[in-house]
């Protein structure tokens, strides 16, 4: 033990800092940095081999891989161009492009997976940006942010909301309304869009990596029948997953298979569409989160929160701030599971209604804008936009501060402590 921490904990701290500093100050590619981190944690014995590389076969990584197949079908069937021309229109400037992008993406993410929403509109943005003569990097970060804050509008919008609300129901016997987070989430969404619009000049202009399928081949031979088929498959996938007929991963897997079977795309095109850089970054972030949890670094932070103050507002703010910081390194789902009992116990021990603590926690664990590894949407656009690691912090940190303050303030106004 060194300063109260195990050797494994210090190795984990060093590895996490090493990844962050490498990505911030060098030109080492993100996938190499994360793969190296997985290897270090395995070689040093912090994690077993299975734990170090389990992210490569996790359901989240499988979901992303399959979504690339679905997008390949939409791309080669000409459906993406149809979506652009019939649904999104053609804005005349960058500001209008941001509004027309973020509003529908945010609303869609309130009832469907933010990963699926990001995957769908990521390719739409690339087509759109070419027509606007704007770098895709000017639109991809706002896309990821919109997919994240849109999930705050309903209890089914994000896994953290589902986890927190279900545990709250078990503890109190009271089921929150499906739209319980809507007033707060809507304020956060509106403020987020305004902040992104005001800070749009801080969005970086980067040279995006060449896609496996170039823009010229997206719809070399438009086929009305295939376009219709691909859109029907997409709609069926979204409806089935939204109504919980099948798990999202199963819905996407079936949709991907149908895209190939109906010849919306070939198996070769589907395979080439997969961005393996995103897969490795996903797996690496899961590995780092596992190491942080296994070495007890998360508990070390959490155990000090309740000793901050006996003032309910101060305690609520402390829980939100710490969870918002940790969610940049851990999964939002993991943070929700870890912080819910703390928030609930804090409220009950202070003799106040736990509802504002629960609603505020929903907002804080999804407040993930400052790093590209914070959420699946951030990771998906990170490689696609050719971003540097620090690009997210330039606009993400101010956005994080403003939205967190908004969320806490509006929560206390709508759900006063009593």
Image: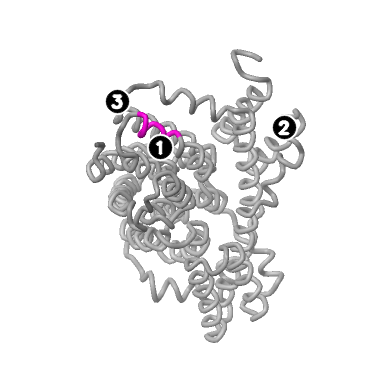
Select label 2 or label 3 by which is in front: 3
* First along the sequence among labels 3 and 1: 3
Mark 3: give few (<14), some (14-19) or many (20+) Cα within 10 Å.
few
Q: Residues within 10 Å of mark 1 (few under 14, many from 20)?
A: many
In the image shown, does 212 or 367 lie closer to the viewer?
Answer: 367
The circle drawn on residue 344 is 1
Q: Secondary structure at mark 2?
A: helix
Q: Can you give x and y, in whole percent of width and height, for residue 159 in the image? A: 49, 52
190, 168: nearer the viewer: 168
Toward which corner of the image does residue 85 lie, by quadrant? bottom left
Q: Residue at x 50, y 26 (%)?
A: 301
Check disc 3 and report its element: helix, strand or loop.
loop
Residue designated by label 2: 40
Depth check, mark 3 against mark 1: the one in front is 1
Q: Which residues are magenta?
A: 342-349
- In three-dimensional space, the C-alpha distance between marks 2 and 1, rounded to whole angstroms, equals 37 Å
Q: Residue at x 53, y 24 (%)?
A: 300
């Amino acid at each position: 033990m060194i300063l109260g921490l195990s050797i494994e904990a210090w190795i984990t701290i060093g590895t996490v800092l090493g990844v962050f500093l490498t990505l911030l100050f060098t030109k080492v590619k993100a996938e190499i940095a994360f793969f190296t981190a997985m290897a270090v944690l395995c070689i040093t014995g912090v994690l077993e081999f299975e734990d170090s590389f389990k992210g490569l076969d996790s359901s989240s990584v499988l979901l992303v891989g399959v979504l690339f197949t679905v997008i390949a079908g939409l791309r080669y069937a000409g459906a993406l161009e149809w979506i652009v021309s019939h649904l999104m229109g053609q804005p005349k400037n960058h500001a209008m492009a941001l509004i027309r992008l973020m509003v529908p993406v945010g609303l869609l993410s309130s009832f469907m997976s933010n990963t699926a929403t990001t995957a769908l509109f990521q390719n739409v943005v690339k087509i759109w940006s070419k027509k606007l003569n704007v770098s895709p990097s000017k639109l991809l970060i706002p896309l990821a942010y919109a997919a994240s804050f849109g999930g705050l509008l309903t209890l089914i919008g994000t896994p953290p909301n589902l986890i927190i609300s279900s545990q709250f129901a078990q503890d109190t016997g009271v089921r929150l309304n499906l739209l319980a987070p809507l007033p707060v989430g809507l304020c956060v969404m509106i403020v987020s869009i305004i902040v992104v619009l005001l800070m749009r000049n801080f969005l970086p202009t980067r040279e995006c990596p060449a896609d496996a399928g170039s823009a010229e081949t997206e719809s070399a031979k438009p086929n009305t029948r295939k376009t219709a088929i691909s859109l029907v498959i997409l709609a069926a996938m979204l409806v089935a997953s939204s109504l919980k007929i099948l798990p999202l991963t199963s819905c996407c897997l079936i949709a991907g298979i149908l895209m190939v079977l109906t010849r919306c795309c070939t198996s070769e095109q589907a395979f080439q569409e997969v961005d393996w850089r995103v897969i490795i970054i996903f797996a690496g972030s899961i590995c780092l989160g596992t190491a942080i949890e296994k070495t007890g670094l998360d508990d070390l932070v959490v155990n000090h929160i309740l000793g901050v103050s006996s003032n309910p507002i101060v305690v609520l703010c402390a829980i939100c701030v710490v969870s918002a910081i940790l969610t940049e390194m851990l999964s939002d789902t993991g943070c929700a599971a870890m912080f819910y009992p703390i928030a609930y116990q804090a409220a009950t021990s202070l003799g106040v209604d736990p509802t504002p603590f629960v609603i505020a926690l929903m907002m804080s664990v999804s407040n993930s804008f400052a790093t590209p590894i914070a959420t699946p949407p951030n990771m998906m656009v990170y490689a696609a936009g050719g971003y540097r690691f620090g690009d997210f912090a330039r606009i993400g940190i101010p956005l994080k501060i403003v939205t967190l303050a908004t969320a806490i303030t509006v929560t206390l106004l709508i759900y006063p402590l009593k």
